[in-house]
Image (tube, rainbow, N blue to C red):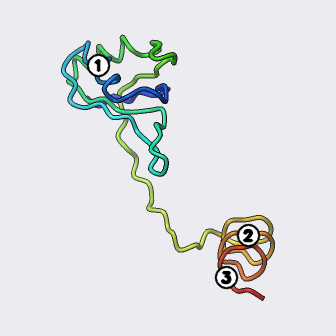
C-alpha cells in the first residue's frame, strides 16, 4: 500500500518518518519529497508498507501531531498524467505584463518590444 503523508515538519528526516510507520509493520520505503532546486523538504511524502498494516497506520496516524505539526495521512491516489510542459517560450500573447510571447509591455518572453526577455530589440 502506498500512503500519502502531508503537513510534515520541514525538519523531519526520512528515517523519522520510517520509524513512525514501522510501529505498525514492515515499511518498504519512506520518502520525503524535496524541492529539486533547493533540496529542502516540500512538507509531504510517501510511505510504502503492507495493506493491512498500512490501513492501521492511516487510522492511527491521521491527524496525529508529529514533530510539532498535525499530519494528514491517507492512501495515495494514483498519479494523474499531466501533459508535458513545453519550454519553447510560446505561452500565450497579448499586451501588458505577461510572461508569454506577447507584443507590447513588460513581458518576459519572446515578445518583439519591451521587457528584458528574448525577442527583437528595436
The residue to which callout 1 is attached is: 19
Task: Give me the residue at 29% from left, 19% from top.
Answer: 19
Mark 3 falls on what kind of element? Answer: loop
Mark 1 falls on what kind of element? Answer: helix
**Badge 3: how crowded within 10 Å, few (<14), some, or many (20+)?**
some
Q: Is residue 88 above or below residue 19?
A: below
**Badge 2: how crowded within 10 Å, few (<14), some, or many (20+)?**
many
Instruction: Give the mark nearest the N terminus, 2 or 3.
Output: 2
* Disc number placed over residue 107 in the picture, else none: 2
Instruction: Give the mark nearest the N terminus, 2 or 1.
Output: 1
Task: Please identify the quadrant where the N terminus is shown.
Answer: top left
Task: Give me the residue at 46% from left, 22% from top.
Answer: 72
Picture quarter containing residue 83? bottom left
Q: Which of marks 1 and 3 is in front?
A: 1
Q: In this view, does 73 lie above or below 37?
A: above
Q: Percent from the top left, x then y, of residue 65?
A: 47, 13
Q: Percent from the top left, x then y, of residue 102?
A: 72, 74
Taking the image as shown, residue 12 lies to the left or right of residue 119, namely: left
Disc 1 and disc 3: Cα gap in Å? Answer: 53 Å
Task: Give me the residue at 26% from left, 30% from top.
Answer: 48
Residue 25 or residue 51, whichever sits in front = 25
Picture quarter containing residue 26? top left
Q: Is residue 76 above or below residue 79?
A: above
* Disc number placed over residue 119 in the picture, else none: 3
Q: Percent from the top left, x then y, of residue 66?
A: 44, 15
Amino acid at each position: 500500500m502506498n500512503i500519502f503523508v502531508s503537513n510534515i515538519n520541514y525538519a523531519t528526516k526520512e528515517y523519522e518518518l520510517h520509524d513512525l510507520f514501522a510501529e505498525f509493520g514492515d515499511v518498504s520505503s519512506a520518502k520525503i519529497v524535496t524541492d529539486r532546486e533547493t533540496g529542502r523538504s516540500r512538507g509531504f511524502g510517501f510511505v510504502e508498507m503492507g495493506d493491512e498494516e498500512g490501513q492501521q497506520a492511516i487510522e492511527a496516524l491521521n491527524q496525529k501531531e508529529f514533530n510539532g505539526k498535525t499530519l494528514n495521512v491517507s492512501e495515495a491516489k494514483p498519479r494523474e498524467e499531466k501533459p508535458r510542459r513545453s519550454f519553447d517560450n510560446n505561452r500565450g500573447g497579448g499586451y501588458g505584463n505577461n510572461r508569454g510571447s506577447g507584443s507590447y509591455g513588460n513581458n518576459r518572453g519572446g515578445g518583439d518590444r519591451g521587457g528584458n526577455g528574448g525577442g527583437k530589440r528595436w
